[in-house]
Amino acid sequence: MKTWIIYLVATLMGLSTTLLLGQFPAYGTFMQTASNVLIQFGGFVLFPIVFFTFASGVASLRKDKIGGRVASSAIIWSILPTLILTILGSLFFAIIPTAFPASSSAGAGTSAVITYVNTLIQYTKDALNPINPFYTLSSTQGMIFPIVFISFILGYFLKPNSDIIRPAYVTMNSFSEVMYRMSSAFAIYGFAFVYIISASFFMQLQSDASIFVAPRFLFSLIALVSIALFGILPLFYGIVTSFKSNPYKIFYRTLGAQLAAMFSGTILFSTPMLYSLTRKNCGVQKRVVSTTIPVTSMFAKGGSAMISTFTILSLIYAATGALPEIKIIMFVILCSFFVSLISSVFNGYGVFFITYFTMKIVGIDLANAEMSLVGLLPLLCGLGTLLDSYISTLCTTASGYWIETEVTVPYADIL
């Protein structure tokens, strides 16, 4: 059975299980614990994949002198959709003003989130210390930038332009194939993980019932995400590829990774399966996938930026009872965009990070009203990460198109 079908079934099973057993405390405790463990396991799988495949991919691209084209396309196609979706979030709010719902759990867990953010800031400073790269590799937990940086240096000098280097290049390429085999296994059997994580996701939404008593905000949020997912991003991809590739086919062929991103709220869990799904289901060359996915996973944060922009404006509207001024909206757009470019440091809390620091930078004081979004973080971060993952997928396939290495994969051959 194809992955896009079995992942949909796993999602429906997770929803059904929560509706049947969600009222039992033991069920909630088990699902939450198991979900946290499985999400961490995604990072356990991702980090070695990034290290070996990125170094191998950089060396291969340098060998054929196309590294600059792939790198520039990956960065450009990551940043442009982020800016476009950030503007979309503000335009949608201007057309349909929506107040952020008062959460029944407003403020609950706020101190824990703030403590976690402060801890990550300190951890980031330590992790970026270049004195001992081996310590950096072993201590990296919540971000892939240190691994990408070290792997890039290794791959840069791994270019097989002499006989003595070629055995090392071949060995690294072999390790890269091992990592893709691991990625394929993770994609094929990851539906079981998504079942548990989706059940935990629905349980958290059920426990914070504020979203269900504020249908206007919920419907507005879903409409905004749908416009971006099925309208703006496919149109952007069509323009980039001269409408020669079908973005909707790419979406359903990588649906397993997109669902994993939404329910986990972090690319650390979904990206491992995205490697094999993009390569085998979308026909993108291995070295393009290996180098583009890590880069776009760090910078393609258009979904999180869009959700944060819409959330900030909704919070201002709810707290003040008046629509924000144009000047405030422009500042929110710019700050959300720039803050999103470094939000990959806070995987799992991207929307909160962008929202919180944007409001601090702009100087918006709502007397801690922004903390009411803590109860809705699973939904907000989930939808933001879903769009981020889809942008990363489209950027990867667009990079393959630009260097003319894409191949057509028959439906019968996809995972």
Image (cartoon, helix red, strand yellow):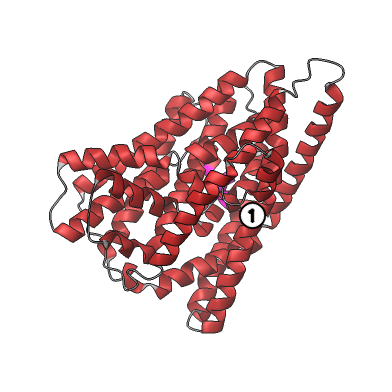
Q: Taking 240 as reference, is 109 above or below it?
A: below
Image quadrant of residue 209?
bottom left
**The furthest residue to the left:** 322
Residue 252 inside the magenta-drawn segment: yes
Three-letter amino acid code at the position of disc 1: Gly
In the rendered image, which residue does mark 1 sit on? 42
Q: Residues within 10 Å of mark 1 (few under 14, many from 20)?
A: many
Image quadrant of residue 68?
top right
| Residue that appears at 52% across and 33% down | 395
Q: Please, what is the dominant secondary structure of the magenta stretch?
A: helix
| Residue that appears at 37% across and 71% down | 108
Range of the magenta residues? Answer: 251-258
Quarter of the picture holding the N terminus = bottom right
Q: Position of residue 224 (x, y in %)?
A: 33, 49
Q: Taking 62 as reference, is 264 above or below it?
A: below
Q: Taking 288 as reference, is 90 above or below it?
A: below
In the image, 55: left or right of 296?
Answer: right
**Which type of secondary structure does the marked residue at label 1 adopt?**
helix
- Taking depth in this image into account, of 18 and 43 the one nearest to the observer is 43
Asked whether residue 409 appears in the rendered view, the answer is no
Q: Position of residue 128 (x, y in %)?
A: 57, 40
| Residue that appears at 44% across and 65% down | 112
Residue 339 inside the magenta-drawn segment: no
Q: Position of residue 120 (x, y in %)?
A: 50, 52
Q: Position of residue 301 (x, y in %)?
A: 44, 42
- Taking depth in this image into account, of 197 and 136 the one nearest to the observer is 136
Asked whether residue 188 appears in the rendered view, the answer is yes
